[in-house]
Image (spheres, grey):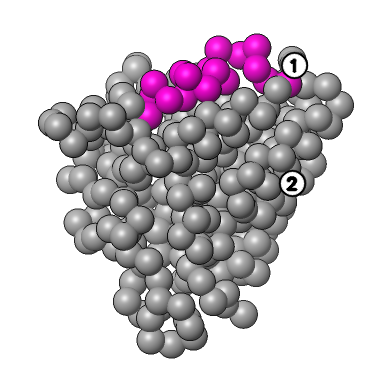
Amino acid sequence: MRSMNPTILAVFAHPDDDALSCMGTLAKFARENYQVHVLTLTTGTRSNTSVGLVRLSEAQAVAEIVGYTLTQHDLPDGRLTCDIDTVALIEKYIKQLRPQVVITHYPQNAGYGHQDHDMVAAATVNAARRTSCVECILYAEPPVQNWGFLPNFFVDITDYIDLKKHAIALHHSESSKSYMLPDIAAMRASWWALQSHPDNYCDGRSLEPFVMVKGLLGRDTFISSDYSNSEYATAPMTFDEVGGHNVPALPSPHLTSAGQ
Ligand SMILES: [Zn+2]
């Protein structure tokens, strides 16, 4: 059964991945009455700074302040595979939640990203592409190294950058890692504003970047008008209303050899 409000499902490997890559976007849509769900597939216990299952409780604290529902699985950290079981698990949530928007990792070329991220991305896109309700699939910014990442879609998170910084800081057990510094995340968001709008628009703004792998570039909405005339009691927000921005399509990241 479909939900009443537009729904976003974000699928990531580890408990802090969503905070780093798209927390501002998730917060923004949660405030705009989207139903926002985050699914993480591992407990992140192989992290050299993790203590027991503390990362799960940190992630739960973030979910509470941001306002989304969090589902955590305990698949083998560091050894995720894109097999029928992983695809079926993600597909189960897609069929249950009926999201219009699915966000997942950006799959980087071998050697530049975390192997779990690549597997989650492949499994998620596999499942999402075969489900008719999913209108838009977005790859989120890699949490550390950006080689090969050429975003073609940006969300203005200026009003949510402080919340994102707070969310990242709540992952105390990972705080010794340089990329987990809240100020680094803010700097990256400012840098993306400059990259996407090299004019006065970027002044003082913070943007989160995505690669849209399924969707309609050039439109100012990513939720089709179909949702306003049938089962949906609440008209969906347009992406303009929540401050999303399309930019002209760039070459496919899979055809680009940046960083190699
Ligand atoms: Zn991760």
Q: Is residue 166 left or right of residue 153?
A: right
Percent of width and height locating residue 124: 55, 51
Percent of width and height locating residue 25: 45, 46
Q: Characterize the magenta stretch by its predominant secondary structure.
A: helix
**What residue do we see at 40% from left, 41% from top?**
159
**In the image, residue 129 above or below residue 103:** below
The amino acid type, in three-letter code, at marker 1 is: Thr
In this picture, which residue range is highlighted in magenta?
173-189
Query: Which element is circle 1 on?
Result: loop
* Most distant residue in the right direction: 52
Q: Is residue 167 left or right of residue 57?
A: left
Question: Can residue 63 be seen in the rendering of this structure?
Answer: yes
Q: How many marks?
A: 2
Image quarter (top left, top right, bottom left or bottom right) of the C terminus = top left
- Tag 2 and tag 1, C-beta contact below 8 Å: no
Percent of width and height locating residue 126: 52, 54
Q: Which residue is mark 2?
A: 72
Residue 244 belongs to the span the image colors magenta: no
The front one of 38 and 135 is 38
The front one of 187 and 178 is 187
Q: Which residue is mark 1?
A: 49
Mark earlier in primary sequence (2, 1): 1
- Pointer 2 local density, CA inside 10 Å: few below 14, some 14–19, many at least 20: some
The amino acid type, in three-letter code, at marker 2 is: Gln
**Res 237 label:** none
